[in-house]
Image (cartoon, rainbow, N blue to C red):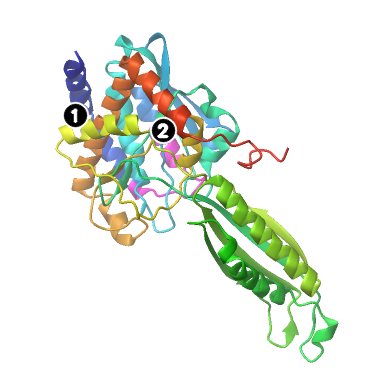
């Protein structure tokens, strides 16, 4: 029975392949930054509606977020297929045009057999992965509370499963002092001194920070003239930790540095923190299911090396809520966030790989929807593996 269903899914995606490829190319030609993805939102919901999904927009207060829903028989789990579609200033150099196209393709494929299964499929359009934290906002607002499983695929230079991600947060610090002529520095309060010593104080604490934590920063503004004591200066830090609890240790160290600078130089300060992206927990059973389908399509799928360095993504926040996967699909040999990768995401090879990805994702969704035993085992792994963080620790509330 499963092989027949896989064949039906595959044929359905093949029949829509030119439409899926055209969607990927259209998004590539219309790159949109975080929270500005109006063209993409319209294009994605239009094709979902064509294939029988009921859509609604303006999800969690974001007007470029959407949910498309298709129902099978009563009962059963809710499987969410996630779509990203925001671009970088250099265009689709992270391949989100392909992510969206693969998710739509998977939705078309699983839609072919959904009426014979118990459960529902949601296609959740998640804007602003590149810095805006669309999925973080959705988690904070409870969008995933009625989801049982979540999945998406990310283009890459390798085929990978079980790749993790670090917890990350960006903080902007503004210091306020008092101006004075450069010949009378004692009459002023040097805001730049506080910025400089914040960097020094963080360096002095590095030995106390958790293993694998990372701190980077730069000076945004340090004054207007060399003969004037700066009354205003600002900087930004990107802090990372292996897990949320480690990141919070680094954040406390940064606030100690800020407090020390203010105390030493007499400045005051204001800190603005972005949303936290958490570490990522990729469900092994779901990943292995995806891997088996991708290998049946002729791809070799690898595991990350023990010393592989990771970046960060808001898919991590979703992985704390429900069993989640984000496997990586090879489309070229170059790194993401480069002009070369942006070019690769519109290549014919990338288009063909996206069709494979859509098929593997849809077949994975089918396996989950059709097997109560697989559902149970996936949830057991999730409960055993994924830690609990309070809403305050995640920054969802201050209380």
Q: Which x, y percent locates residue 334?
A: 27, 58
Residue 351 falls left or right of residue 271: left
Q: Quadrant of the N terminus?
A: top left
| Residue at horizontal 63 percent and vertical 36 percent from the top | 391
Q: Nearer the N terminus, badge 1 or badge 2?
A: 1
Q: Which residue is mark 1?
A: 14
* Quarter of the figure that contains the C terminus: top right
Callout 1 environment at 10 Å: few (<14), some (14 to 19), or many (20+)? some
- Can you identify the residue that label 2 sits on? 324
At 16% from the left and 32% from the top, the residue drawn is 296
1 w.r.t. 92: above or below: above
Q: Which residues are magenta?
A: 28-45
* 241 and 180: which is toward the camera: 241
Residue 71 in view (yes/no): no
- In this rendering, would 83 be left or right of 113? right
Percent x, y of residue 38: 47, 40
């Amino acid at each position: 029975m499963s092989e027949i269903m896989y064949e039906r899914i595959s044929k359905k995606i093949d029949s829509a392949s030119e439409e899926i490829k055209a969607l990927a190319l259209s998004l590539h030609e219309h790159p949109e930054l975080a929270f500005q993805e109006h063209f993409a939102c319209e294009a994605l919901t239009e094709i979902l509606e064509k294939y029988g999904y009921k859509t609604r927009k303006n999800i969690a207060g974001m007007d470029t977020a959407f949910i498309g829903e298709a129902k099978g028989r009563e009962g059963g789990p809710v499987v969410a297929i996630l779509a990203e579609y925001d671009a970088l200033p250099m265009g689709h150099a992270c391949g989100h045009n392909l992510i969206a196209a693969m998710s739509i393709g998977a939705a078309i494929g699983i839609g072919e057999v959904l009426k014979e299964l118990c459960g529902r499929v949601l296609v959740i359009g998640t804007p602003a992965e590149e810095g805006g934290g669309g999925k973080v906002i959705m988690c904070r607002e409870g969008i995933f509370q009625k989801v049982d499983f979540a999945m998406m695929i990310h283009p890459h230079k390798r085929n990978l499963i079980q790749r993790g991600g670090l917890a990350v947060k960006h903080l902007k610090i503004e210091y306020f002092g008092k101006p004075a002529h450069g010949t009378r520095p004692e009459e002023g309060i040097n805001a730049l001194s506080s910025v400089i010593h914040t960097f020094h104080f963080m360096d002095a604490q590095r030995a106390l920070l958790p293993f694998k934590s990372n701190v980077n920063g730069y000076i945004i503004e340090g004054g207007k003239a060399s003969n004037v004591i700066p009354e205003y200066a600002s900087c930004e830090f990107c802090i990372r930790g292996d897990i949320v609890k480690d990141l919070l240790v680094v954040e406390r160290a940064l606030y100690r540095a800020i407090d020390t600078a203010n105390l030493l130089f007499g400045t005051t300060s204001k800190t603005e923190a972005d949303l936290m992206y958490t570490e990522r927990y990729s469900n092994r059973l779901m990943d292995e299911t995806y891997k088996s389908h991708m290998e049946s399509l002729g791809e070799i799928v690898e595991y990350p090396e023990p010393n592989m360095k990771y970046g960060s993504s808001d898919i991590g926040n979703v992985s704390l809520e429900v069993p989640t996967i984000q496997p990586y699909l090879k489309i070229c040999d170059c790194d993401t966030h480069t002009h070369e990768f942006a070019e690769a995401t519109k290549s014919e090879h990338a288009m063909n790989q996206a069709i494979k990805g859509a098929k593997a994702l849809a077949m994975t969704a089918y396996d989950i929807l059709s097997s109560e035993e697989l559902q149970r085992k996936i949830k057991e792994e999730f409960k055993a593996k994924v830690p609990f963080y309070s809403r305050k620790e995640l920054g969802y509330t201050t209380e």
